[in-house]
Image (cartoon, rainbow, N blue to C red):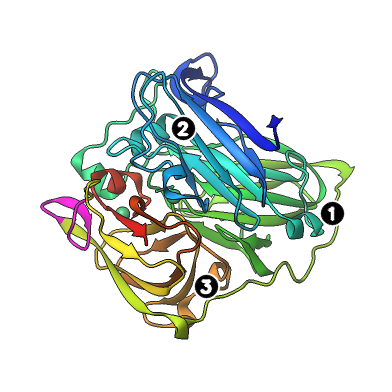
Amino acid sequence: IIENGIKKFHLNIQESHHTFFENINTKTYGIESTYLGPTLLLRQGESVEIEYKNNLPEATTMHGHGMHVPAIMDGGVHQVINPNQCWSAKYTVNQPASTCWYHPHLMGKTAEQVYMGLAGMIIVEDEESKNLNIPQTYGVDDIPVVLQDKKFDSSGQIDYSPTRMEIKRGYKANTFLVNGAIEPYFNAKTGWLRLRVLNGANARVFTISFGLFKSFYQIATDNSFLEQPIKLNSLTLSPGERAEIVVYVDRDLVLQDRNTSKSLLYIFKDESIGLVDSLPTQLTNLERLNIHDAKRVRRFVLNMRRGHMAINSKIMNKNRIDERVPVNDVEIWEIINPMHMVHNFHIHATHFEIIERNGSARNVLPSERGFKDTIYMPPRSTAKVLVKMKDYVDEVHPYMYHCHILEHEDDGMMGQFTVV
Ligand code: C2O
Ligand code: CU
Ligand code: CU
């Protein structure tokens, strides 16, 4: 609804029942829905007000992951919404076209609440993206694909009960869901189909593919288009990461996870002709930061403290500000994963550019050369990213950075920074 020039959303966060399996009612959480939430379509420059009403029996928060907004509108650990209360994220959309998402961020509860079904996609459009000759008819040739895995007990109920070991390894299971459905199908027209893929799993890393002999193109990373479409056979996404891909539908296709060889989504070719038949060679020009402008280096070591997940040997404390970042300074953030396990690293409020992996710029993949907010950190790896905090100075209210393996985040692998 548009009211006084403000685009308003009223979203109920509720307990519900969803049908994952025939004849079984599974208890879930959802947003205006039985599982997950609606896709919010935003346009650069417009004023929005997203009101969340918490009808759950417990507190929650709702964070706009990938959204460049003031700290008090971020929906992080401090913007708690108690049961029967409302909270609104009000801001002017101030970022280029991208695929973002929203999900709870309550301290110690994020993993469980996301697992129960709380998450939804945010699509940001801009002038440039509207004028590109790429698929962009939502639900027809531009579709959201939220990847998750889920553990169900023998009666078909969601089972979220990680042991200490499963917290360390990340809670993984072998039922795969796309948009809350098990191996769903989509009827696509002949031609280019755009998939906005979000890894919305707590801990699983997906490597998507249509099989060895079918290539596709990646057109966007977490926070922006790539400058040119990148031809790929497979693409790895760690939790929280997004990629927009386009695939030419000339026959029936199966989107699979190459790590497990399991099917995720069936795409059935329909006889009608699609809307877009050729792709542009240039998608955008990115305004890159210059490494020579970097004023300082900050280091973030993903490690442990007293048996808990930590960053720089500190467990998350919501009353502690770990870093103060001067607005408009270019900085190098060096991320180090010295452990034998997978992590990743997400920074709120901003996008970054990956400039180095394992000590060299050559190790940065072509498919990572757009703006990102979450970076996959394989075991025993390092990376450097360039960041610049813009626009929203607030000495009091912090943003967060953390591992997006949600069990690790809840266990303490998170820190806070203010923009000063
Ligand atoms: Cu998607 Cu701080 O989170
Ligand atoms: Cu975020
Ligand atoms: Cu981690």
Please tell me whether residue 252 belongs to the stretch shown in magenta.
no
Q: Amino acid at mark 1?
A: Val
Q: Is residue 35 left or right of residue 83?
A: right
Q: Which residue is mark 3?
A: 365
Q: Position of residue 323 (x, y in %)?
A: 29, 62
Q: CA distance from mark 1 to mark 2?
A: 33 Å
In this view, the residue in front, 81 or 99, is 81
User: In terms of secondary structure, where does tag 2 sit?
Assistant: loop
Q: Is residue 137 left or right of residue 206?
A: right
Q: Which residue is mark 1?
A: 276
Q: CA distance from mark 1 to mark 3?
A: 28 Å
Mark toward the start of the polypeptide (3 vs 2):
2
Q: Is residue 230 above or below residue 293?
A: above
Q: Quadrant of residue 387?
A: bottom left
Q: Which residue is mark 2?
A: 118
Residue name at image x 25 percent, y 68 percent: 338
Mark toward the start of the polypeptide (1 vs 2):
2
Q: Quadrant of residue 120?
A: top right
